[in-house]
Image (cartoon, helix red, strand yellow):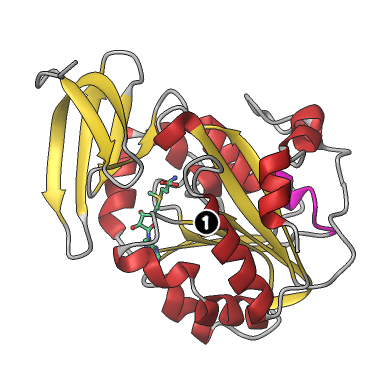
């Protein structure tokens, strides 16, 4: 079946897969970092793509943003200082700020245009940008992590594009070493780690690099994400200190979420056999 130009599609040669939505392009620009396009779709609201890869849609972004935030924050004893690397659509920032114990949340996005276009096309994701606890910093997350005061961050959320272009270094040993240095002793990192089905080798490499950098433990969480390749996505958690994840779920039901709750928190860490096997040892 071939698609005519009433469809927006992301075709991934590397995995031999494609995803398509019916819709039309309403904006296109090349920034110094990447090509950003916005589409108005028939059934998923607005869709942002970066360099041809789906990033965020009105209809299903809640899955990703909630699951990149709440499981990690509710697995940390006192997440007061949070840093989001990437995340320029501001959806993760919005979820992080739902936690009253968070005292500061800094979003470090390399491309200011992603945020400005999100304010225009996804205003609901930006409705917490004026929160006094929020800082929107525009610059490279790799450099930011090198420069931040050691031992000053509780939770690092890496909400980046795929490991190519400006995001490539966010998946490497040097960056993970800087993250460990930035974290307080109880600190943790969570990073979007693509599809368990299509990108298992990448996930294995990430966990190996996190451990080589000095993180004591790593684990995976997973969730559905319709607009991403295979429709199934993951986040990788790395703990600075050994001892496993704690469960701090007393406020889980009052977070005003669409997907996340106490049961989904527990379910997202349950791993299928092929993933367990791949990550063993
Ligand atoms: N949810 C998306 C996904 O998993 O495909 C990610 C969305 S978010 C829009 C990704 C952001 O990471 C982009 O806006 C991009 O500009 C940003 N980014 C990429 N490399 C970066 C870097 N080195 N420092 C800071 N932000 C970066």
Quarter that holds the C terminus: bottom right
x%, y% of residue 4?
Answer: 10, 18
Identify the magenta region. Answer: 71-77
Of residue 37 and residue 117, the one placed in the foreground of this image is: 37
- Give the residue displayed 45% in from the left and 37% down from the top: 125
Query: Disc 1 marks which residue?
Result: 201
Disc 1, SS? helix
x%, y% of residue 49?
Answer: 27, 41
- Does the segment drawn in magenta span residue 75? yes
Please tell me how crowded label 1 is: few (under 14), some (14-19), or many (20+) other residues with Cα within 10 Å: few
- Give the residue displayed 74% in from the left and 30% down from the top: 264
Instruction: Determine whether, in the image, residue 253 is placed left or right of residue 109.
Output: right
Confirm whether residue 60 shows in the render.
yes
- Does the segment drawn in magenta span residue 8? no
Instruction: Determine whether, in the image, residue 163 is placed left or right of residue 11.
Output: right
Residue 257, above or below 95: above
x%, y% of residue 88?
Answer: 39, 52
- Give the residue displayed 87% in from the left and 46% down from the top: 248
Instruction: Determine whether, in the image, residue 262 is placed left or right of residue 102.
Output: right
Mark 1 sits near ligand 1, with its Cβ under 8 Å away? no
- Give the residue displayed 67% in from the left and 42% down from the top: 274
x%, y% of residue 198?
Answer: 47, 43
Residue 269, above or below 239: above
């Amino acid at each position: 079946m071939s698609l005519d130009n009433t469809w927006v599609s992301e075709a991934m040669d590397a995995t031999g897969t494609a995803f398509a939505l019916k819709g039309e392009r309403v904006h296109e620009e090349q920034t110094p970092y990447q090509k950003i396009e916005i589409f108005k779709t028939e059934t998923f609201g607005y869709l942002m793509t970066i360099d041809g890869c789906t990033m965020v849609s009105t209809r299903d972004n809640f899955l990703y943003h909630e699951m990149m935030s709440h499981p990690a924050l509710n697995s940390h004893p006192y997440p007061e200082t949070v840093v989001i690397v990437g995340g320029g659509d501001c959806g993760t920032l919005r979820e992080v700020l739902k936690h009253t114990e968070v005292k500061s949340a800094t979003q470090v996005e390399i491309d200011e245009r992603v945020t400005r276009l999100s304010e225009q096309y996804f205003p609901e994701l930006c409705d917490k940008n004026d929160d006094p606890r929020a800082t929107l910093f525009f610059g490279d997350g790799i450099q930011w992590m090198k420069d931040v005061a050691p031992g000053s961050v509780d939770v690092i959320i890496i909400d980046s594009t795929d490991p190519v272009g400006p995001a490539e270094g966010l998946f490497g040993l040097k960056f993970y070493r800087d993250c460990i240095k930035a974290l307080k002793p109880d600190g943790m990192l969570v990073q979007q780690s693509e599809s368990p089905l299509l990108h298992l080798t990448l996930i294995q490499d990430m966990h190996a690099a996190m451990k080589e950098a000095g993180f004591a433990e790593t684990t995976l969480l997973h969730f559905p994400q319709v607009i991403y390749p295979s429709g199934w996505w993951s986040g990788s958690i790395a703990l600075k200190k050994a001892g496993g994840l704690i469960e701090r779920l007393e406020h889980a039901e009052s977070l005003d979420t669409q997907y996340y709750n106490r049961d989904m928190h527990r379910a997202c860490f349950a791993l299928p056999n092929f993933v367990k096997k791949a990550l063993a040892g």
